[in-house]
Image (spheres, rainbow, N blue to C red):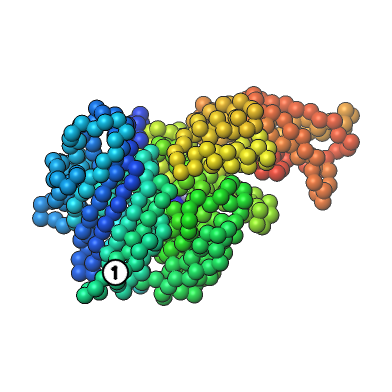
Amino acid sequence: MRQFHVLLMLCALGLVIQGAKADNYPRNPGIDVLHYVFDLTLSDETDSIEGHATVHVRFNSSEVSTFALDLIGREARDSERGMLVSAVHHDGAAIPFAHINNRLTIKVNPTPTRREIRQYQIEYEGVPADGLIIGANKYGDRTFFGDNFPNRARHWLPTLDHPYDKATCEFIITFPAHYQIIASGLLVEKTDLPLSDMRLTHWRQQVPISTYMMVIGVAEFAVQNLEPINGIPLSTWVYPQDRQAGFDDFAEAGKAIAFYSEYIGPYPYRKLANVQSKTRYGGMENPGNIFYSERVVRGTRSNEGLIAHEIAHQWFGDSVTTSDWNHIWLSEGFATYFTHLYMEATYGRPRMVEGLQRNVRRIVAYRDRHPDLAIVDPRIPVDEILSANTYQKAGWVLHMLRRIIGDEHFQESARAYYARFRDANALTEDFQKIVEEISGQDLDWFFQQWFYQPGLPVYEGHWSYDAQAKRVNLTINQVQTDGTFYVMPMDIGIVFDSNDEPLIKTVRIDQRENTFSFPVEHEPIDVVLDPNTWLLMQAEFKKE
Ligand SMILES: [Zn+2]
């Protein structure tokens, strides 16, 4: 997703609690949820939903006597907000459960055998306080949109609500027939129910995904089917009032699918719908049906970067998913950098450089507010993981990695990482291992300094020309005072004629104070650091 309220979010990050382990989700290695079926009934008369969920659980151990799902409960006895569970069934019989502190604990009886798969049915109802957003859209029309990131599926779906446990899912949704519906997976049934104005639709998501991406969108939509891309059906779903503007805005989504499919590997899902919605984000990358903020549809085709970002997520974030919230850069940093790659391939390198330079300003502003936070930082709570560090800085780190290992090895690494972790989970170390295998280089120095230490290098220096010796002499000092130190290759551009490409010399900055000297034919008119924009830094450099 791409955040709207950057300032708000950056302020929130000021509240980070030192030393707390942020991703403290109570994992249960004894079980693995394989599949969910969510049978929900929606209504125009009430915001209350009736739910019937079937959860397919595999037991990895015979030691499991209970397990818990996340489900936000009733706030108060007389409130309708939150979910009230009326029964849990296994094998047709009601079984004991407890629904306390938003955890639905289910008793496992008899003792399971290892690898046994059981199905549990949960009956519940209530008004979702969040997660399924029910209410008026910007035109005052009633809509229902799932918006689960990062841990809000539990407001309306009883789930193991953490990305480490992916599952396949089905939605069986019954709703007033004047609406249209889009949901995770493929439509397998659509029936107008007799003697009522209700319609039932059944959707099946056959590739495992995270609970934060299991969604439905129910609204009055204008729907346009576009030319399939590589056999993948492509469609646009927008509010009828925004019909032409929305169809225009999303018309070029196919270009991004084609580019990423070629660069990374086959598109992971069986459809792609671009959907105008009430998500709180600029866009939310739900697999196969990306939900965009209702505000971004303007008919100006100015959303190409946003669309390219959300489509990149289908590979990175959706198909390859972090297994720990503090490695969310594997989602946002990849989507940010692959958008730059798409812009470079589509419009040329200057367009990418423009984007990277814009990103530097965000990264520096973030560093100024949070001088001690690294990209992978276990102190950051889950609701504050979206930041200039996990988006723009991580994107920049991928850009620098590309320079270190070269274009071919970079692309090969992205392809191998996707091939190996497709429909699964990964951590930063998994990506590092693949890059090291492909490039044949030990890259621990690079990963350690860029992902696990804060900030960025700050360089100060000067150059001079020695006419007698015909040499250019440079001093480059690394002067940041936050206790960090970076070892990096740096291109030096020696400019003799402003109309020509500069002469490039590559040096290694591995000391606090570094001096270099190059023989030249005659006096240059300028010497510049990193002329081709390969290094994330702040620098002041001038003629002595
Ligand atoms: Zn994103």
Q: Quick one: SS at disc 1?
A: strand
Q: Around disc 1, counting alpha carbons within 10 Å, would you say few (fewer than 14), some (14 to 19), or many (20 or more)?
A: many
Q: Quadrant of residue 141?
A: bottom left
Above or below 20: residue 531: below
Q: Position of residue 152 (x, y in %)?
A: 31, 49
Q: What residue appears at the point 51 percent right and 63 percent down from the top-left corner?
A: 234
Q: Position of residue 75 (x, y in %)?
A: 16, 50
Is residue 361 shown left or right of residue 386?
A: right
Q: What residue appears at the point 55 percent right and 30 percent down from the top-left corner?
A: 433
Quadrant location, the C terminus = top right
Work out whether residue 495 or residue 122 is closer to the camera in this orientation and state it.
122
Looking at this rendering, what residue extends furthest in the left direction?
78
In the rendered image, is residue 373 in sight? Answer: no
Q: Position of residue 55 (x, y in %)?
A: 27, 46
Work out whether residue 373 or residue 396 is closer to the camera in this orientation and state it.
396
Q: What residue appears at the point 44 percent right and 71 percent down from the top-left corner?
A: 223
Is residue 300 shown left or right of residue 488?
A: left
Above or below 139: residue 455: above
Q: Quadrant of residue 425?
A: top left
Q: What residue appears at the point 73 percent right and 40 percent down from the top-left corner?
A: 528
Above or below 146: residue 107: above
Is residue 98 shown left or right of residue 343?
A: left
Is residue 61 shown left or right of residue 96?
A: right
Q: Position of residue 479 (x, y in %)?
A: 59, 30
Which residue is tagged 1? 199
Q: Quadrant of residue 280?
A: bottom left
In the rendered image, is residue 161 in sight? Answer: yes
What amino acid does circle 1 point to?
Answer: Arg
